[in-house]
Image (spheres, helix red, strand yellow):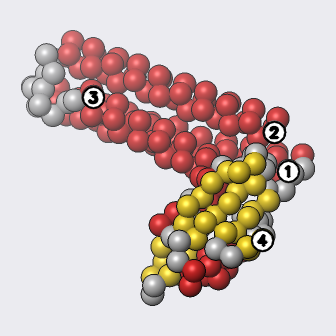
Amino acid sequence: MATANYDLNEIKRRMHGAIQVLKQELAGLRTGRASPGMLDPVQVEAYGTHMPLNQLATISVPEPRMLAVQVWDKSMVHAVEKAIINSNLGLNPATEGQVLRLRIPELNQERRKEMVKIAHKYAESARVAVRHVRRDALDLLKKLEKDGKISEDDHTRMSAEVQKATDELVAEVDRTLAGKEREIMTV
């Protein structure tokens, strides 16, 4: 019997949040293959504020190693170009009217290894986030048992549920990382 304060689905939802963040971070890692997500971190100085690039342009992948950025407002082309150059992504746009073409350079082995290290850091952050959720849930269960709201048996059973969810999510982090690592090393 679960109490109102303990909700396994909510705990799992919070843990899945860490996986979503990991997937977004990994999508931003350049692998030598073009992906519109590579430009997600690019902020453009536009209309007196900083805006994400995808709010000013359509990003497409016309070729496996090329991105095309179709800027909607002609007056923003220079600002978008400048933002891409200053983004530290190592991309140099070739501008043709309102379309910026970005050729994705080949990755050398050293750069690939650096990217794998970064991917490992992202994955470790996700694992830590999942474990923090587990710790919060286990602390709550201890408190509920101490306050007499759940029995020792309920505490043991619910703790096992939380640990099982944690193990599943950490395994998903590891699978996600392994997939990204393969992608980085074999492009």
Amino acid type indicated by mark 1: Leu
Q: Report the front residue among 87 and 56.
A: 56
Is residue 47 visible in the rendered image? The answer is yes
**Quarter in which the N terminus is drawn:** top left
**Spatial distance from mark 1 to mark 4, Cα to Cα?**
20 Å
Q: Earlier in the sequence, mark 4 or mark 3?
A: 3
Mark number, residue 187: 2
**Spatial distance from mark 1 to mark 2, Cα to Cα?**
8 Å
Disc 4, SS: strand
Q: Position of residue 83 (x, y in %)?
A: 63, 76
Q: Earlier in the sequence, mark 4 or mark 2?
A: 4
Q: Position of residue 172 (x, y in %)?
A: 53, 27
Q: Which residue is mark 4?
A: 94
Relative to residue 84, is residue 4 depicted above or below? above
**Spatial distance from mark 4 to mark 3, Cα to Cα?**
48 Å
**Spatial distance from mark 2 to mark 3, Cα to Cα?**
38 Å
Q: Nearer the viewer, mark 2 or mark 3?
A: 2
Q: Nearer the viewer, mark 1 or mark 4?
A: 4
**Residue at horizontal 75%, vertical 32%?**
182
Amino acid type indicated by mark 3: Asn
Disc 1, SS: loop
Mark number, residue 107: 1
Disc 3, SS: helix
